[in-house]
Amino acid sequence: MGRLRLSLVFAVVSVVLFLGHAPKEANASSSTSAFVQNVIYSNKIAIFSKSYCPYCLRAKRIFSELNEKPFVVELDLRDDGAKIQNVLLDLVGRHTVPQVFVNGKHIGGSDG
């Protein structure tokens, strides 16, 4: 009888903990996704970058040479950078940077 009760308590605690955390994670995920979509569609050029990445520097330099000023999100300088990268993985199938969007269209990375 004690084992059954312990199993039941464990199951209830697990469900409560899961339900207690699930909405926060879902909201964070959906708000991160909304942020990414907003960046992509609200800017002529959007680059998801890391400040130390040589490929990102190259991509930003190319637009600078074209006298274009992209909206840049430096993932390594943001607390939610990893979440943004996960959204990009779902969106474009890549977890690498840079990820460049022009007029809402994904054009790839540094070699894109």
Image (cartoon, rainbow, N blue to C red):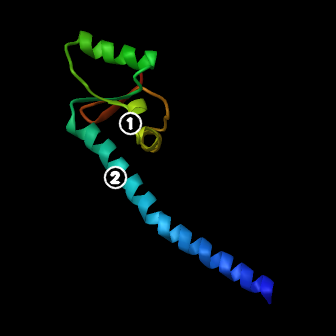
Pick whichever, 55 or 91, lies toward us: 55
Residue at (37, 54) in percent of width and height: 30
Which secondary structure lies at badge 1?
loop
Q: Which residue is mark 2?
A: 31
Pick whichever, 66 or 50, lies toward us: 50
Amino acid residing under circle 2: Ser
The quadrant the N terminus occupies is: bottom right
- Name the residue at the bottom extreme: 1
In this rendering, would 18 be left or right of 91? right
Q: Which residue is mark 1?
A: 78
Q: Quadrant of residue 28?
A: bottom left
Q: How many marks?
A: 2
Instruction: Tell me which label, 1 or 2, sits earlier in the chain.
Output: 2
Q: Nearer the viewer, mark 1 or mark 2?
A: 1
Q: Quadrant of residue 65?
A: top left
Q: Is residue 111 visible?
A: no
The quadrant the C terminus occupies is: top left
In this rendering, would 2 be left or right of 86? right
Residue 16 location, x and y as percent?
54, 74
Q: Is residue 56 above or below residue 106?
A: above
